[in-house]
Image (cartoon, helix red, strand yellow):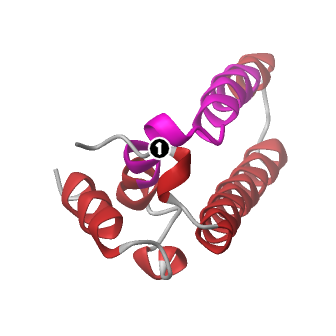
């Protein structure tokens, strides 16, 4: 079973999971800010501005949905973040080994 229930985690494990999610969020949003800063400096035409706007709209939707802490999808959410490079398995140390194995396996898919 890949679903994680809230009573599977101790208070400490829940804290680790939330901190890991926050680290991934900070990494991704920092990268986005740097990307936007670079693109903004190279704006030369109005069309470039609209492309930047579209990028930001898309990223906002993606990030808002990706970083919702939801026990029922936690394994998949963490696997996605690992696969995308925003989260490292080391950030999840302290979680149950079976959960880490599932995250690792799904991230390799």
Quadrant, the N terminus: top left
In the rendering, at what x and y percent does residue 73 appear? 45, 37
Check the image and report above or below for 70 versus 61: below
User: Given the current orientation, which residue lies at the most extreme front position?
Assistant: 7
What is the quadrant of residue 12 in the picture? bottom right
Query: Position of 60 compared to 97: left or right?
Result: right
Query: Position of 17 compared to 108: left or right?
Result: right
Q: Which residue is mark 1?
A: 5
Residue at left offset 72%, top offset 17%: 47
In the rendering, at what x and y percent does residue 8 appear? 47, 56
- By secondary structure, the bulk of the magenta-drawn segment is best described as helix
Q: Is residue 43 magenta?
A: no
Residue at left offset 83%, top offset 49%: 41
Check the image and report above or below for 34 versus 67: below
Query: Position of 62 compared to 81: left or right?
Result: right
Which residue is at the front of the view, 44 or 92?
Answer: 92
What residue range appears in magenta? 53-78
Residue at left offset 63%, top offset 58%: 21
In the rendering, at what x and y percent does residue 69 appear? 64, 42
Which residue is at the front of the view, 49 or 33?
Answer: 33
Q: Residues within 10 Å of mark 1 (few under 14, many from 20)?
A: few
**How many numbered discs, if any?**
1
In the rendering, at what x and y percent does residue 90 appear? 46, 82
What is the quadrant of residue 27 in the picture? bottom right
Which residue is at the front of the view, 12 or 16?
Answer: 12
Q: Secondary structure at mark 1?
A: loop
Check the image and report above or below for 65 versus 85: above
């Amino acid at each position: 079973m890949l679903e994680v229930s809230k009573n599977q985690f101790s208070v400490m494990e829940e804290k680790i999971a939330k901190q890991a999610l926050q680290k991934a969020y900070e990494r991704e949003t920092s990268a986005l800010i740097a990307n936007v800063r670079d693109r903004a400096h190279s704006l030369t035409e109005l069309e470039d501005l609209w492309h930047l706007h579209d990028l930001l709209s898309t990223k906002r939707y993606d990030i808002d949905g990706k970083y919702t802490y939801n026990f029922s999808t936690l394994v998949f959410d963490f696997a996605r973040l690992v696969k995308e490079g925003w989260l490292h398995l080391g950030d999840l140390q302290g979680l149950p080994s079976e959960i880490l194995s599932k995250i690792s396996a799904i991230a390799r898919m």
